[in-house]
Amino acid sequence: MWAGNVTTVGLTLSVLGWHESVEVRLDSGSCPGMPNVTVSTSHTTQDFKTWDTKSSDTFVVENPSKASERWRFGLSGLEPGCCTEMKASGDALDARYCTFAEKPKASSDGSRVTRIAIAGCDRFDTAYDDDMQVYAAIADLRPDLLLHLGDMHYRDIGSTEHPMAGSSRSLDLIGSAIEQVLSRPSRQALLRSVPMAYVYNDHDSGFNNADSRNYLRDDVGKVYRAVVPHYPLSANSTASGPVFQALTVHGVRVLLLDVNYDSEPWAERRISEAQMAWLRKELSLSSRQRWKLVVLATIEPLVA
């Protein structure tokens, strides 16, 4: 499993592999006083259910599409710092995810520190099948969030498998590559307790040095929107296009850029005018919002 789109009041969970349902249990110690939680699934447009937490602290979310191996669901109406324990059907391991608290947790010396881990360029493929124990080491640090800035795997599907754009084979290969890398034990040691915000780069969007000419870029975007538990995308990119997004954790504003979809290295340009306009707007708002810090997260510089 993999959690993302975490806020102070909700989160989204992506379920990898074939599981008919996920059992969700509220931690009563961290979730007092919530009468109802809204549960929504991603395969239907208006599939919302209300979880009466006063009647039961446990709720079973069923896979909305029995034909889909990968699905996700969202929880909203939670409280800041509320933790949930989850277990997928047929899975021996539990996962625990919490909404963001209003303030960072106090450390042993009394200080409050927001911890954000950053990863990228995993170099994972079928030929180089290591388990990257660095992820287990990151889990030991107990970060609030993992930012993965791209190249989660080096499968280079466009240059090794050559699927036809728009085909079911293309979509399945892209989804399977994500599932394969995230199912490794070291990744799961981290992702079963730490949410991740992720954008793709060249290798995990098709092939080495893929840019705006990538013939698979819309297939990658389609799988991303269906499977990845991402934060809300720009209004101009909800159906296709780049997947830039913003999030806030403990007063820190993170601007997660997509430097791949519209990349034109020959013109020394990584992002489109639309994404640049969004970025300028976010930066102009930063002084009004009084963020403690604004983080510009990108795996590549904004010029080629």
Image (cartoon, rainbow, N blue to C red):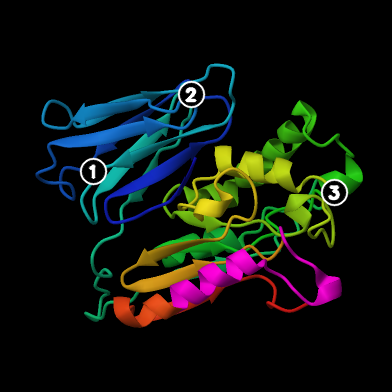
Q: Quadrant of residue 264?
A: bottom right
- Tell me which secondary structure the magenta stretch mostly adopts: helix
Q: Is residue 263 above or below residue 81?
A: below
Percent position of residue 184, x then y: 63, 45
- Could you tell me the amino acid type at mark 2? Gly
Q: Residue at x 53, y 47 (%)?
A: 188
Q: Position of residue 116 (x, y in %)?
A: 45, 69
**Residue that numbered label 3 is attached to:** 127
Q: For the residues labelled 3 and 2, say whether their Cβ atoms are less than 8 Å apart.
A: no
Q: Position of residue 210 (x, y in %)?
A: 82, 58
The question of residue 164 being in magenta is answered with no
Residue 86 position (above or below residue 4): above
Query: Callout 1, which amino acid?
Result: Gly
Q: CA distance from mark 1 to mark 3?
A: 44 Å
Q: Observer-nearest residue: 72 or 243?
A: 243
Foreground: 284 or 209? 284
**Magenta-drawn segment:** 261-283
Residue tagged 2 = 90
Is residue 115 visible in the rendered structure shown here?
Answer: no
